[in-house]
Image (cartoon, rainbow, N blue to C red):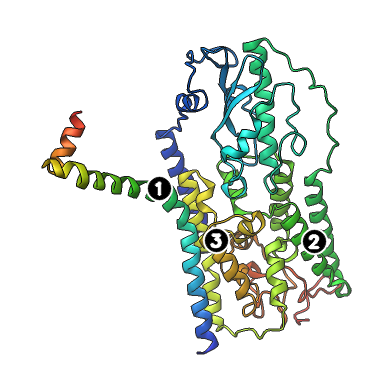
Amino acid sequence: MTEAKKFRLLIIASVIVTALALSHALVREYLAPDLESYVRRRLHYSQVIAKKGLGLHKALYWKEKE
Amino acid sequence: MKKIRILIITVIILSLAAGSALRAHRAATVDEAAALRELAPRASFSPKNGNPPFYRGSDGSVAFNSFDVVPSIRGYAGPIKLMLVLDRTGAIRGIKILEHRETKTYVHYLETPGYLSRFIGKTIADHFEVDRDVDGITRATVSVEALARTAKESSRLVAAEALGLRAGDGGGQAGPRRFPRWSIAVVLFLLSFAGYFVTRRTKKFRRLRDLSLIAGLAGLGFFLSAPFSVLHVFNLLLLRPSSSALWYAVVFGTLLTMTIAGRFYCGWLCPFGALSELIGRLPVKKWEAPAEADNRWRKLKYAFFGFAAALVLVSGRVDNGNYETFVTLFSLHGNVFTWSLVALSLIACLRVERFWCRYLCPVAALGGLLSRKAGGYNGAADCPMGNRRPPEISECIRCNRCYNRVDSGGWTSGAS
């Protein structure tokens, strides 16, 4: 492998790590809580609501009414 | 360079405008009721009233938001808002940080219940002095001092108003006055800037820069843990100045020298730059990067700087733009990605001179944007930045190795 190629790989690796470092705070602050709450809702639906024979949209409708 | 300057200034102005508009619509609300329930679950509290405003508890305690009482006490990047509960005797029964804008990397320990629980039981007569009756946190001294002062002064004022208690002076002897930390930074800037001008006059004292780099690494890096960061500039743009003299010494020292001598800070004082350069001096063969690719990739730091500026100024949170390796290294706190970046940047210096400074550093980008034309820099084979001849002034760290000046006032064209 030539030095120019190694240099390019090094730069690309560092760009990826820098982008991950920059996006880490955003993911932790904004995306992770949304994802977590979505997974919780989805689990609640599959474990509780679906067993009562209600569709997801119907369940959401009644939840809003409550 | 002119295009990059215009682009970055446009990004900053647009981001500031977008951020201000967003924050105006979404005013931050602090849930004081939830904090009260957490700190004193058995008591019920009256609505907030009085001057300074406080809540009176059914058990005779009082609770208050410190920002209502002492809004002027600021940490490194703004006030540290506390919810405090005092009992009838003026002793702290509960304490919680409601909001702060300090860099999380430095103050992560400050927020833990374990640390804050050490304030429980302190009375308004106590000193609240860091390293005396309040535990200091290495690399977060300014924030800890602000936290302690906020707790002390707000408690005393509310205790006097709501409980009729006076603190006196606490009885004990005041602790010995420490050497002011800001003065170390000022001395470092003055000495290294003097060294910069000396080495422009004569090449005999070229080694002064090595001494300055080691002093920067030891002083600004490991001892003060206060390397200049673009987060400081973002805080300034968000109108969040600090009450720390060290903050002003580092920020204005760097910005002033940048406007006079471009990337002088990078070449003479930056602790991470010093470490990178020292590693780069190890006898390992350097890679020959093609000139065109090298020039192209050097623009990368401006892209990251602009992106980080947009993230911070729109969101209003400086932590969102924190990817600086020196913040992680000298605060000894980071996540897996920032530590990976530290390791990668330092190891890369074995093969590419000052890898981080050349391609990724946002402070280097800021220094490049503030660099003005300067004559006499012709390029040298042993340039610590691997610059080609003649060097782009925004890439020059003013080591003065290639600086040539003739006494008649003209400039020689030959390299050293």
Label 1 and label 3: CA atoms lie apart by: 19 Å
Residue type pointed to by label 3:
Thr
Q: Are marks 2 and 3 in contact (CB under 8 Å)?
A: no
Does label 3 lie on the same chain as label 1? no
- Residue under label 2: B215
Whichever of labels 2 and 3 marks the residue nearer the N terminus, that label is 2
- Give the distance between the C-alpha atoms of the residues marked 2 and 3, in whole angstroms: 25 Å
Name the residue beneath numbered marker 1: A30
Chain label for disc 1: A
Q: Amino acid at mark 2?
A: Ala
Residue B338's tag is: 3
Taking the image as shown, residue B285 lies to the left or right of residue B406, namely: left
Tell me which residue sits at (42%, 53%) in the image: A27
- Left or right: where B55 falls relative to B409: left
SS at circle 1: helix
Q: Position of residue A41 (x, y in %)?
A: 26, 44
Residue depicted at x 13% and y 40%: A52
Count neighbours of disc 1 (C-alpha within 10 A) and say few if under 14, some if 14 to 19, many if 20 or more: few
Determine the secondary structure under disc 3: helix
Chain holding disc 2? B
Quadrant of res B175: top right
Of tags 1 and 2, which is closer to the observer?
1
